[in-house]
Image (cartoon, grey):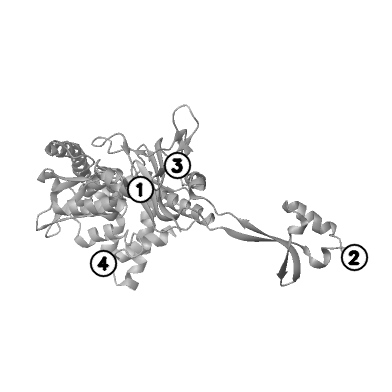
Amino acid sequence: MSTDTVLFELGTEELPAGEYVVMAEALCAGICSGLQSHSLSHGEAKVLATPRRLTVIVSDVATNAADTEQEILGPPIAAAKTKEGEWSPAAIGFAKKQGVAVEMLDTIATDKGDRLGLVKRVTGAVCAEVLPEIVTHAVAQIPVSKRMRWGRERHEFLRPVQWLMLLLGDESLELSLFGLSSGRVTRGHRFHGKSEITIPNPNCYQEMLRDEYVIADHQERKAMIRKQVEALVSGDETAVIDDGLLDEVTGLVEWPVALRGAFDDDFLSVPRQALVSSMREHQKYFHIEASDGSLVPAFITISNIESNNPQAVVYGNEKVIRPRLADAAFFFETDKATSLAVKSERLESVLFQRDLGTLAAKQRRISRLAVALCEELGADEATVTGAAAVLKADLVSDMVGEFPELQGIAGRHYALNDGLSDAVADAIEQHYWPKFSGDQLPSSPESAAVALADRLDTL
């Protein structure tokens, strides 16, 4: 059986980092399903994806499906002829429907007796003929979160489609989608590569793109980024590589280049989580820890260009992160100017739920519930009462307003700033624990008491 490799590439403007891999996988599933529905066997199906392209490569695709025989059953033999031995109307009608002379019909044995019938030879599908239709259907089935239109036409996709390529081995197949016609031309990196690259066959696709500064394989780019990031830290440092952030930055680049920058030591007085959030959530930077787990005043960013002056790129990123960290420092210092007790009074004007009153009312209910749990949990009532009195106060702080994920964490820092005990500060932070299944649990009976009380009140 003759086989060949299929390559389909959908070239677009930059796609959202969190969506294009799922889209490429759906495209691959659609193409493979279409091949199977036409009885075209195939080997490995590979998904390649970058912010500017969704690509599927399927190896060992049968160029022709095998011919098959199809039995079409007609009337029972007993009803095929009249008493006079002539063909019955049922037999004649069946032959006419099949477009053959009645004499060409066969006798076919079945479980319910012999029947008049016809054995038809069905020619197998030709891959080159059905592939454009398969791809068209697969593209239509790609899950798209929000469609947009571009140009004068009414075509819709997540981002404007710029080019198409459909190859079956060395042959370029004709396909029309989004007002475009397919060819064998792809595009290199937006800044480093050629605007047009002619691909002779699927086997050289990845290497030819690599020569034009495009790593087409998402997983390969991801591994490259991890390796580059780890190479930029010294022996006693550790780059904290969050899998979610790694996936996200992989989805932002076609040619990853890791660069290390730094920020002022003075910012280390700000709660660690605020600094990490500024770097990770806002700038997509990886942060660095020292051997003792403390934060190093440095970061690693992933660029999409190989600059002739990398230090200029580093400087630009340092210039961007500095005001963000300065904002966090400002919020922290401003919040410390008023105690948690004062902040707690402001909860009287913050609605929790229409039928349940304000956050201040919720805080009072939590306090009563937590005190009631003290004996059962063996918790110190004074500590529980002290924590419950200001448990939600940090929700009105500037820091939590800017960094919602710091609720509880900010409260702990402000409690220590107010001179409250470590046990009270821990309870304020840990009353949100666990945040998800498998997360760490409160470390003390006092923390457990307020955590349980908060959840009981919510329920």
* Residue identified by numbered label 2: 83
Q: Position of residue 285 (x, y in %)?
A: 22, 46
CA–CA distance in space, label 4 to label 3: 64 Å
* Residue identified by numbered label 4: 443
Q: Give me the disc on residue 173.
A: 3
CA–CA distance in space, label 1 to label 2: 66 Å
Q: Position of residue 91 (x, y in %)?
A: 80, 59
Point 28% across, 44% down: residue: 208
The amino acid sitting under disc 4 is: Ser
Disc 4 on helix, strand or loop? loop
| Front one among 196 and 120 | 120
Mark closer to the chain start, 4 or 3? 3
Q: Give me the disc on residue 202.
A: 1
Compared to residue 211, the image places residue 84 above or below, namely below
| Front one among 59 and 243 | 59
- Extreme residue in the top direction: 152
**Is there a contact, CB below 8 Å, between mark 3 and mark 1?**
no
Q: Give me the disc on residue 20.
A: none
Q: Position of residue 258 (x, y in %)?
A: 18, 46
The answer to whether residue 249 is visible is: yes
Mark closer to the chain start, 3 or 1? 3
Q: Position of residue 65 (x, y in %)?
A: 52, 56
